[in-house]
Amino acid sequence: MGRRGSRVKGRGSRVDHIILISVIGAGRMPIGYFRMKDAAEQAVAESGIPWTVLRAAQLHDFVLPFVRGLVKLPLAPAPRGVNFEPVDVESVARRLADLTLAAPAGRVADIAGPEVLSIETLIETYARALGKRRRMLHFSIPGSIGRAYRDSANLASGDVDRAGRTWQQYLDERRPRRD
Protein backbone atom coordinates (compact mmCIF):
# COMPACT_ATOMS: atom_id res chain seq x y z
CA MET A 1 0.00 0.00 0.00
CA GLY A 2 1.49 3.34 -1.05
CA ARG A 3 0.74 6.85 0.07
CA ARG A 4 -2.92 7.77 0.51
CA GLY A 5 -3.96 4.17 0.02
CA SER A 6 -2.99 3.94 -3.66
CA ARG A 7 -1.93 0.57 -5.03
CA VAL A 8 0.23 -0.31 -7.98
CA LYS A 9 -0.03 -4.02 -8.63
CA GLY A 10 0.55 -4.46 -12.33
CA ARG A 11 -2.14 -5.66 -14.72
CA GLY A 12 -5.49 -4.13 -13.92
CA SER A 13 -3.95 -1.17 -12.14
CA ARG A 14 -4.58 2.41 -13.16
CA VAL A 15 -0.95 2.93 -14.20
CA ASP A 16 -0.63 3.34 -17.97
CA HIS A 17 3.13 3.62 -18.35
CA ILE A 18 6.14 3.17 -16.08
CA ILE A 19 9.26 5.16 -16.93
CA LEU A 20 12.48 4.05 -15.25
CA ILE A 21 15.83 5.78 -15.47
CA SER A 22 18.64 3.32 -15.05
CA VAL A 23 22.39 3.31 -15.56
CA ILE A 24 24.51 2.12 -18.45
CA GLY A 25 26.19 -1.09 -17.34
CA ALA A 26 23.26 -2.38 -15.26
CA GLY A 27 23.54 -6.13 -15.48
CA ARG A 28 27.23 -6.01 -16.45
CA MET A 29 28.95 -4.21 -13.59
CA PRO A 30 29.63 -6.24 -10.39
CA ILE A 31 28.80 -3.29 -8.12
CA GLY A 32 25.77 -3.13 -5.82
CA TYR A 33 24.30 0.04 -7.33
CA PHE A 34 24.42 -1.42 -10.85
CA ARG A 35 22.92 -4.70 -9.62
CA MET A 36 20.06 -2.83 -7.92
CA LYS A 37 19.35 -0.93 -11.13
CA ASP A 38 19.31 -4.22 -13.08
CA ALA A 39 16.86 -5.72 -10.56
CA ALA A 40 14.63 -2.63 -10.85
CA GLU A 41 14.64 -2.97 -14.64
CA GLN A 42 13.61 -6.63 -14.36
CA ALA A 43 10.83 -5.79 -11.89
CA VAL A 44 9.44 -3.11 -14.21
CA ALA A 45 9.61 -5.44 -17.24
CA GLU A 46 7.79 -8.19 -15.31
CA SER A 47 5.18 -5.87 -13.78
CA GLY A 48 2.63 -6.32 -16.53
CA ILE A 49 2.43 -2.55 -16.94
CA PRO A 50 3.62 -0.99 -20.21
CA TRP A 51 7.10 0.39 -19.60
CA THR A 52 10.09 2.32 -20.87
CA VAL A 53 13.63 2.06 -19.47
CA LEU A 54 16.31 4.62 -20.26
CA ARG A 55 19.87 3.84 -19.25
CA ALA A 56 22.04 6.93 -18.81
CA ALA A 57 25.76 7.42 -18.40
CA GLN A 58 27.10 9.25 -15.37
CA LEU A 59 26.00 12.86 -15.31
CA HIS A 60 28.60 15.63 -15.48
CA ASP A 61 27.32 16.70 -12.06
CA PHE A 62 28.16 13.25 -10.67
CA VAL A 63 31.62 13.08 -12.25
CA LEU A 64 32.65 16.59 -11.16
CA PRO A 65 32.74 16.04 -7.36
CA PHE A 66 34.59 12.76 -7.88
CA VAL A 67 37.24 14.39 -10.08
CA ARG A 68 37.39 17.49 -7.85
CA GLY A 69 38.26 15.25 -4.89
CA LEU A 70 41.02 13.52 -6.85
CA VAL A 71 42.54 16.82 -8.00
CA LYS A 72 42.69 18.13 -4.42
CA LEU A 73 45.17 15.39 -3.55
CA PRO A 74 48.90 16.03 -4.08
CA LEU A 75 49.09 12.87 -6.18
CA ALA A 76 45.82 12.08 -7.97
CA PRO A 77 44.86 8.37 -7.99
CA ALA A 78 44.19 7.37 -11.60
CA PRO A 79 43.07 3.76 -12.03
CA ARG A 80 44.08 2.31 -15.39
CA GLY A 81 41.33 1.33 -17.77
CA VAL A 82 38.60 3.40 -16.08
CA ASN A 83 36.64 5.43 -18.60
CA PHE A 84 33.46 7.46 -18.40
CA GLU A 85 31.16 9.08 -20.95
CA PRO A 86 29.68 11.92 -18.89
CA VAL A 87 26.40 13.38 -20.09
CA ASP A 88 24.46 16.59 -19.45
CA VAL A 89 21.64 16.43 -16.97
CA GLU A 90 19.67 18.67 -19.37
CA SER A 91 20.03 16.15 -22.21
CA VAL A 92 18.85 13.31 -19.97
CA ALA A 93 15.92 15.39 -18.69
CA ARG A 94 14.82 16.24 -22.25
CA ARG A 95 15.02 12.60 -23.26
CA LEU A 96 13.01 11.51 -20.21
CA ALA A 97 10.35 14.15 -20.93
CA ASP A 98 10.07 12.95 -24.54
CA LEU A 99 9.79 9.33 -23.43
CA THR A 100 7.17 10.20 -20.82
CA LEU A 101 4.98 11.80 -23.49
CA ALA A 102 5.46 8.93 -25.95
CA ALA A 103 4.04 5.43 -26.00
CA PRO A 104 5.76 2.75 -23.91
CA ALA A 105 8.86 1.56 -25.76
CA GLY A 106 10.55 -1.04 -23.55
CA ARG A 107 14.31 -0.62 -23.36
CA VAL A 108 15.30 2.40 -25.46
CA ALA A 109 18.70 3.56 -26.72
CA ASP A 110 21.12 4.47 -23.94
CA ILE A 111 22.02 8.13 -23.51
CA ALA A 112 25.65 9.11 -23.01
CA GLY A 113 27.86 12.10 -23.51
CA PRO A 114 29.54 12.82 -26.83
CA GLU A 115 32.90 11.40 -25.78
CA VAL A 116 34.47 8.54 -23.85
CA LEU A 117 37.16 9.87 -21.51
CA SER A 118 39.74 8.16 -19.34
CA ILE A 119 39.97 9.11 -15.70
CA GLU A 120 43.37 10.61 -16.54
CA THR A 121 41.79 12.93 -19.13
CA LEU A 122 39.02 13.95 -16.74
CA ILE A 123 41.61 14.81 -14.07
CA GLU A 124 43.93 16.66 -16.48
CA THR A 125 41.10 18.69 -18.02
CA TYR A 126 39.70 19.70 -14.64
CA ALA A 127 43.13 20.57 -13.22
CA ARG A 128 43.90 22.66 -16.32
CA ALA A 129 40.60 24.53 -15.89
CA LEU A 130 41.84 25.47 -12.42
CA GLY A 131 45.21 26.53 -13.78
CA LYS A 132 46.86 23.56 -12.07
CA ARG A 133 48.75 20.44 -13.05
CA ARG A 134 48.39 17.18 -11.20
CA ARG A 135 50.75 14.28 -11.06
CA MET A 136 48.92 10.98 -11.06
CA LEU A 137 49.42 7.68 -9.37
CA HIS A 138 48.49 5.00 -11.90
CA PHE A 139 47.33 1.63 -10.62
CA SER A 140 45.02 -1.20 -11.62
CA ILE A 141 41.79 -1.95 -9.81
CA PRO A 142 41.96 -5.65 -8.89
CA GLY A 143 39.31 -8.34 -9.17
CA SER A 144 36.01 -8.47 -10.98
CA ILE A 145 35.33 -4.73 -10.61
CA GLY A 146 38.66 -3.81 -12.19
CA ARG A 147 38.13 -6.34 -14.96
CA ALA A 148 34.64 -4.94 -15.65
CA TYR A 149 36.00 -1.39 -15.96
CA ARG A 150 38.89 -2.53 -18.18
CA ASP A 151 36.34 -4.39 -20.33
CA SER A 152 34.26 -1.16 -20.61
CA ALA A 153 31.22 -2.80 -19.00
CA ASN A 154 30.20 0.61 -17.63
CA LEU A 155 30.11 2.17 -21.12
CA ALA A 156 27.35 2.22 -23.71
CA SER A 157 27.41 -0.49 -26.31
CA GLY A 158 25.03 -0.97 -29.17
CA ASP A 159 22.22 1.55 -29.56
CA VAL A 160 23.33 4.81 -27.93
CA ASP A 161 22.27 8.43 -28.25
CA ARG A 162 25.37 10.64 -27.86
CA ALA A 163 24.06 13.94 -26.56
CA GLY A 164 24.95 17.21 -24.90
CA ARG A 165 28.10 19.06 -24.07
CA THR A 166 31.59 17.69 -23.83
CA TRP A 167 33.38 17.57 -20.49
CA GLN A 168 35.47 20.59 -21.53
CA GLN A 169 32.36 22.57 -22.53
CA TYR A 170 30.73 21.68 -19.22
CA LEU A 171 33.78 22.88 -17.28
CA ASP A 172 34.06 26.07 -19.39
CA GLU A 173 30.46 26.93 -18.55
CA ARG A 174 30.89 26.19 -14.85
CA ARG A 175 34.20 27.99 -14.47
CA PRO A 176 35.49 25.70 -11.71
CA ARG A 177 36.48 27.46 -8.54
CA ARG A 178 40.13 27.41 -7.64
CA ASP A 179 40.13 25.47 -4.37
Image: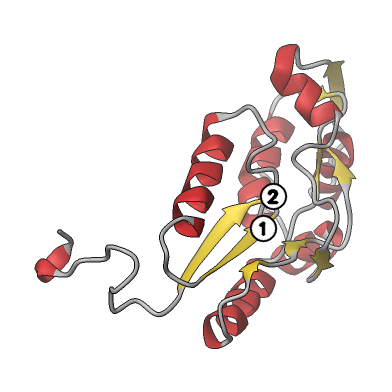
Residue found 42% across the figure and 69% down from its top:
49
Quadrant including the N terminus: bottom left
Q: Is residue 85 above or below residue 53?
A: above
Please name the amino acid that badge 1 sits on: Ala
Q: Residues within 10 Å of mark 1 (few under 14, many from 20)?
A: many
Q: Dots 2 and 1: beta carbons under 8 Å?
A: yes
Residue found 49% across the figure and 39% down from its top:
36
Q: Circle 2 is placed at which residue position? A: 24
Residue found 65% across the figure and 57% down from its top:
55
Residue found 69% across the figure and 56% down from its top:
60
In front of the other: 48 or 100: 48
Q: Indicate the position of residue 151 as horizontal and vertical percent values.
A: 85, 30
Q: Circle 1 is placed at which residue position? A: 56
Q: Indicate the position of residue 179 as horizontal and vertical percent values.
A: 65, 43
Q: Is residue 170 above or below residue 102?
A: above
Residue 152, quarter of picture = top right
Q: Indicate the position of residue 161 as horizontal and vertical percent values.
A: 81, 68
Q: Residues within 10 Å of mark 2 (few under 14, many from 20)?
A: many
Residue 93 horizontal side relative to residue 76, left or right: left
Q: Indicate the position of residue 143 as horizontal and vertical percent values.
A: 73, 12
How many angstroms separate mark 2 from mark 1 (CA)? 5 Å
Q: How is the image coloured?
A: secondary structure
In front of the other: 113 or 33: 33
Residue 95, numbered circle: none
Please name the amino acid that badge 2 sits on: Ile
Looking at the image, can residue 77 be seen?
A: no
Q: Is residue 13 above or below residue 23?
A: below
